[in-house]
Amino acid sequence: MRQRATRDQQRLDSGAVSSPKDLESLQREIASLAKRQGDLEDVVLEVMERREAAQERNAELTERVSSVQAKTDDATARRDAALAELDAEAASVTKEREIVAGSVPADLLKLYDKLREQQGGVGAARLYQRRCEGCRLELNITEVNEVKAAAPDTVLRCENCRRILVRTSESGL
C-alpha cells in the first residue's frame, strides 16, 4: 500500500497526468490510501498493545505455575520423606512384634490375632481405673473383684467388647 501511494505521488508530482479528472482521481486515491494506512496502523498499534498485555499475563501465569509447581514438589518431597519414615517405623515395630510374639504362648497369640481381626485391629486393651480402654466402658464391681482375685498370669477378657485386658501397675486395681 505504501509502494502504491509512493508510486501515485510520483506520477502526480511528475506531471505525467495531464487530465484534470485523472489528477482529481489520483489525489482521491492517494488520500484514500493515506486514510487506509492510518486505519491499519491504528489496528496494528491496538494488536501490539493487546499482544503486550497478553505477554505480561502469560509471564504472570507462568510465574504462578512455577510457584504452584514448587509447592507441589515440596509437598511431594515431604510426603515421600514421611512415608519413608513410616515404612522404617513399621519395619521396626514389626521386628519388635516378632520378638515379643516369640515369647507369647501360641494359643494366646492365636486368640489375640483372632480378636484383632474381629475388633478392627485392636485385640487387647489396657485396663485403667476400672475402665476397658478398648470399648471405654467401666467394669462392674463383680468384674473388678474377679480381676483383683485373678493370678497375674491369667488371661482376662472384657465382658463388653471381649478384648484381652492388659493389667499394668497403673491400672489402679
Image (spheres, helix red, strand yellow):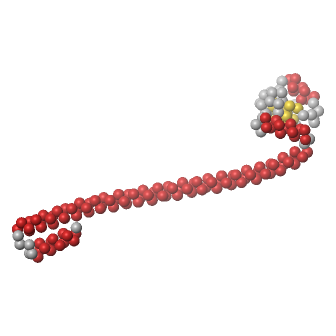
Tell me residue 32's x, y (percent). 17, 62
Question: Does residue 76 appear left or right of residue 92 in this picture?
Answer: left
Residue 126 visible, this orientation: no
Along the line of sight, the residue nearer the viewer: 70 or 17: 17
Q: Residue at 15% x, 66% y: name it.
A: 30
Q: How many marks?
A: 0
Up-down relation of residue 7 to residue 31 (above or below):
below
Q: Position of residue 158 (x, y in %)?
A: 84, 30
Q: Residue at x 80, y 48 (%)?
A: 93
Q: Return the x and y of residue 92 as percentages of the image width and height.
A: 80, 51
x 80%, y 30%: residue: 161
> Viewed as shown, does residue 39 lie left or right of 136?
left
The residue nearer to you, when weighing 80 against 148, is 80
Q: Quadrant of the rendered structure where residue 69 is? A: bottom right
Query: Vertically, is 108 above or below 83?
Result: above
Judge whether residue 19 can be spotted in this image: yes
Closer to us: 4 or 105: 4
Residue drawn 73% across the image and 50% down it: 86
Residue 129 rendering spot, x and y as whole percentages? 82, 31
